[in-house]
Amino acid sequence: MRIIFIMMLPFLVTSAIAAPHWVNKPIQCGTIDDVDGLIYAMQEEFLLRGVGTIYNQNREPALGIIGVYGNIETGTFTIIEVFAGGTEVCVIAFGNKLKFDLEDYILEMPEPNKHPRGIDKMKIPS
């Protein structure tokens, strides 16, 4: 009986880890003018925009605009989401060391059991 349990243990552990799950991340939200002021202060320029599904605090989906801004000279970037109607903007992420070298990862053939776009190869520079 003990041997069967030990043999089944890896299957029990991996199935719980593999599923995505909701997390409550602290993000900053404000008016368009407030967030625009932050982006302007960092001298970041508009890089790209897309329409995506975003969720409110009750986990209700809605369409919104995802925007990415960056300053190529300083390396700073900001990722925002704008709720429909433009009443609220949230800063999803911001940081530095902005690079446009993802093509180095994309052009490589993925190894078996690895992410096809190389996301698992990206390392956070120190």
Image (cartoon, rainbow, N blue to C red):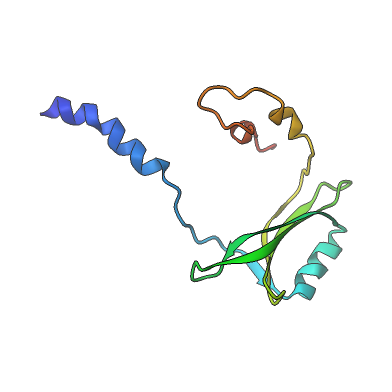
Q: Residue at image x 74%, y 28%?
A: 104
Decide which of 109, 34 is in the foreground and name it.
109
Give the left or right position of residue 83, taking residue 11 as reference: right
**x and y, in percent, of residue 126 in the image:** 69, 37
**x and y, in percent, of residue 35 in the image:** 76, 69
**x and y, in percent, of residue 16 in the image:** 35, 43
Please tell me whether residue 53 is drawn above or below residue 15 in the rendered image.
below
In which image quadrant can residue 90 be found? bottom right
Q: Residue at image x 70%, y 76%?
A: 85
Q: Residue at image x 70%, y 37%?
A: 125
**Quadrant into which the N terminus falls:** top left
Q: How many marks?
A: 0
User: Residue at the left extreme?
Assistant: 1
Decide which of 50, 126 is in the foreground and name it.
50
**x and y, in percent, of residue 11 in the image:** 30, 33
Please tell me whether residue 51 is drawn above or below residue 29 in the rendered image.
above
Give the left or right position of residue 22, taking residue 78 as reference: left
Q: Residue at image x 48%, y 57%?
A: 23
